[in-house]
Amino acid sequence: MTFPVAGPRRYPARVAGSAGCPAHPEWAGLVCQTTTGETTASVPVDATTAYTLWGDAKTQTETKGSTVRTTTTTFDPAGRPTLVHTAVAGLSGSTPVDDTFTHYSSTTGAVDYSGTQNPSTHAETGRVSTGYDAWGRTIAYTDGNGVVTSTTYAAPGANGAGSVSSESTKNAAQAVVSSTAYTYDSSGNTTKQGTTIGSRSFTYGATYDTVGDMVTQTLPGGVTQTNAYSRDGQPTGMEYDGTAADGSSVAMLAWTMVSDAQGRTTQVDTNAAVGTDGTQTAERTLRYGYDNAGRLTDVTDTRGDVCQDRAYGFDSDGNRTAQTTTTVTGEDCTVTANTTAAVTKTWTYDSADRITKDAAVHAVVTTTDDGGNATTATTDTGGATAYTYDALGRVTTLPAGDTPAAQSAEATGQPVAAGDVSIGYYDTDAARTTSAGGTTTTYGLDPAGRRGTSTVTKSGADTVSTVMDFGDDSDNPSYATQTVGTNAPIVSVYGSSIGGDLGFNTTGDTATLDLADPHGDTITTMTIPTAGNLALLASPIQAFDEYGNTCTDLTTTGDDGNLTDGSTTTSSATGAIHYGALGAKQRATDTTGLTLMGARLYNPTTGQFTSTDPVAGGNSTAYAYPQDPINSFDLNGQWGWRKAWHRTTHWVSKHRRGLTHFGLSLAWGIGTGLAVGALCAGTAGFGCAVGAGVAISMWQVPGHLAIDRAYHHKTSGREAIGYLRGSIQNGIKGPYQSHYVTKPLWHRTKSYASRLKFW
């Protein structure tokens, strides 16, 4: 949310306060009220009316006119949330939700189960639970339908010690749905992953370079994925190769990438594109340009003898206000004399960063008849149909012109045949229904607040019901059971690759391999035979633009010279759940074309979510998707992150042994200080503390040696001396810091807290 004039108001320290922020000196500096700078706020005013001792919000209200959403959180004496109640008053059409509860283990403090309960009767309506081993690692996860996923770990001293060794998922009837086993090398890298589903087995293998980057991955069906990197770890290439009948390797799909000094992709060359005839693959070159704010402002998309330039404009708040798409004949987008179509779309926003109307579309299209005569037509459409928002700032009516179904028509100046999209919500902002063209999809939530069921209805057609089951606390289903009308249910099981992305799925008796591009978009699926290698790629692949819209073949006229909306390919076969753009991350596509992006619905046509960000400041505005969609993502609908995170996790993986040593030293130092405090509490001298500290701290040396053994590292004499020296230093510093720093700070904190009232 942007604040044109005013920002958050905070509780005053000593003054009397005001009607909106009454005097509460014990909450001084904590947020009291958040609103826009408008005289009359166009979006709900968010107020926090009660805090806990630890500064956690107990009661929050969001008020817009007569509509009030109240979120009340109950905490236990340790300051942990145990119950959340959300209720909306004064807003018809918003569906109530059950309260959510969290239970903590009395021995470990970890969350052992959570779930939902009826707000009135407090009767439990569902739960998910987690079991742990003595190290705090998850060994069992049970979802809301009673599906149990069990996990084991590699033993100490074995390759990959502490890493997942096996996973097994059983349905509520205790029948095994899938099981996976992992193999590691001496550096802890996964080298083999085998998954069994029914009578079928699917095996992945991987090799790595000296810094731990995966360079090859063998996939089921005789497919090999090859990756290349620059010296600073940036991806520079990816390729999928199949196996021919004679056993030779055959290139199928390939990408080469170029990055700038900031790690942003600036160019991609690939053969993964929709061809000019709408079939097979085609050579494609993408070039990306950015402004000083790091936003993607220009894309040139060259395919064969056609080039398209897509330019984006933004306002000072970061709202995307314009998109100009220019298509020319030839490989150079700057040759304007060869322009066949120039389409400009503009949007307007209110002071709360909400789109007010569908895009105003100005299109200039040039066509040529069989005699070589050129005709230029100019059309102006859109810009007249208003968005509808409810009092909580959620889009309830998405105008036809801004729907994903209208995108390909608008790109060539064609009339929009798609209708409006209607959206309904739960009180928590989770999407409940989407409707378009007579088709309605209704989503049900599981005890963890995830979309656990979907029901698709359309007059004259069979009802399609899907139940999702989960193997962990993510929102990526492990498998889904789909029933069409009165037919027998069909189960789609989803398996990951070694890299962690969606790798394959089995639906009934058919297994398909999911192939994704470097961005994570599922571009094609290939049937995996029960024996031997799969057939080489022959079907068209899907292509997506930077925001996730399905690309056409860039044509603007048909064989008869008439305008056309371009050719697209059939969606990939991904079982019960449709995965396309960001399908490798299991971001599903709704029947309306909207993307189910975690907590929110995402519209690739506008680059906007349909509801406000549950985490303030996650993106440039409360509705915006990251405006560098090539290098940044918001997969859960709560906050955006850049690809640089990959480099961070890679660094952590590369230095995990050193980090483990550091963690041991830090924890032992703190523990030494506490132990010495107890042993020497009755003495008067600092010498007792130092002596006891050194004696206790020396016991961490065997721990350091054990870490080296666990990581299959041979400890050198220099390293052993370093462990000994570090232990002595910890033994001296621990008591010193405990006596002169930690204890006085703790006493001051307790003294301050005792003077405050938090009720």
Image (cartoon, rainbow, N blue to C red):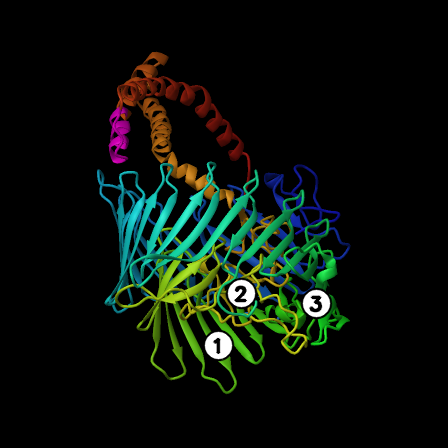
Q: Nearer the viewer, residue 464 or 100?
A: 464
What is the number of callouts on the image?
3
Residue 435 against residue 475 in the figure, above or below: below
Three-letter amino acid code of the residue under disc 2: Val
Q: Which mark is residue 456?
A: 1
Image coordinates for residue 256, horizontal then vertical, percent? 49, 49
Question: Residue 557's quadrant in the figure?
Answer: bottom right
Kindly identify which residue carries mark 2: 274
Is any part of residue 507 visible from this angle? yes
Question: CA gap, disc 2 to disc 3?
Answer: 28 Å
Q: Quadrant of residue 418?
A: bottom right
Mark 3: which amino acid? Asp
Question: Which corner quadrant of the image does residue 176 belong to?
Answer: bottom left
Q: Which residues are magenta?
A: 701-715
Q: Earlier in the sequence, mark 3 or mark 1?
A: 3
Q: Is residue 569 above or below residue 744?
A: below
Q: Mark 3 — residue?
A: 358
Left or right of residue 659: residue 237: right
* 572 in magenta: no
Mark 2, secondary structure of its residue:
loop
Residue 56 in view, yes or no: no
Name which residue type carries label 1: Val
| Magenta stretch encompasses residue 704 | yes
Dominant secondary structure of the residues highlighted in magenta in the image = helix
Q: State left or right for residue 194 relative to residue 326.
A: left
